Image (spheres, helix red, strand yellow):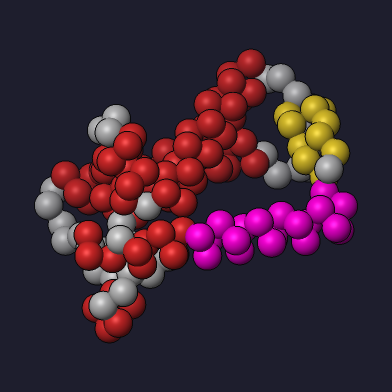
Amino acid sequence: MHLCARPLATTELDHELLWLSVSVSSVSLAGAWLAVGLPWPVCVFHQLTGLPCLTCGMTRCAIQFFHGHFLAALKWNPLIFALLCGVIAFDVYALLVLATRTPRFRIAFRQVEKRCVRGMIILALALNWIYLIAHWRDF
Ligand SMILES: [Zn+2]
């Protein structure tokens, strides 16, 4: 893994601006959706099988997270909680580099490291699903 900081090239995609915009827009839309009382998303997998899917509890996790109830958010869906923490960290970083026009961090992985990261992601998904199935009566 190679981490470097460099200025954004003129033809390079501005990931910080793009993903910060997507993140803020998504949270704003979701907040507006719930604020006007539109129906919550329904999990077809849970309705068909009675078991939670990988993302079951995501809405409740996000609501608890954005109300500052972090332990409750963690209990609803640990993987989504970790994802939200990562998104917040990225958004803070993106806001800082955009505001200060400082060099951007980029990570380059070798092939073996990419396989290792994929394996860890699959393991995290599996462990999260096992946790959700063990607590499926909460849904
Ligand atoms: Zn689900």
Q: Residue 88: x, y in percent? A: 48, 33
Quadrant into which the C terminus falls: bottom left
Magenta stretch: helix, strand or loop mostly: helix
Q: Residue at x 19, y 49 (%)?
A: 34
Please state which of residues 132 and 27 is positioned toward the viewer in this rendering.
Answer: 132
Q: Position of residue 76 (x, y in %)?
A: 31, 51
Asked if residue 53 can be seen in this view, the reply is yes
Q: Position of residue 26 (x, y in %)?
A: 39, 47
Residue 68 in the magenta stretch? The answer is no
**82 sits left or right of 2 in the view:** left
- Outermost residue on the bottom side: it is 48
Asked if residue 112 lies in the magenta stretch, the reply is yes
Say which residue appears at 70% left-offset and 44% top-offset: 13
Any part of residue 28 in sight: no
Quarter-wise, where is residue 5 in the image? top right
Above or below 111: residue 95: above
* Left or right: 37 as drawn, with respect to 89: left
**Which residue occupies the foreground of this view, 24 or 123?**
123
In the orientation shown, which residue stands out farthest toward the left?
Answer: 37
Label total for image: 0
Q: Which residues are magenta?
A: 109-127
Q: Which image quadrant is residue 100 in? A: top right
User: In terms of depth relative to the viewer, which is nearer, 9 or 113?
Assistant: 113
Residue at (62, 58) in percent of width and height: 121
Q: Farthest residue toward the top?
A: 100
- Name the image quarter holding the N terminus: top right
82 up-or-down from 97: above or below: below
Residue at 77% x, 61% y: name it. 115
Q: Position of residue 9 (x, y in %)?
A: 81, 35
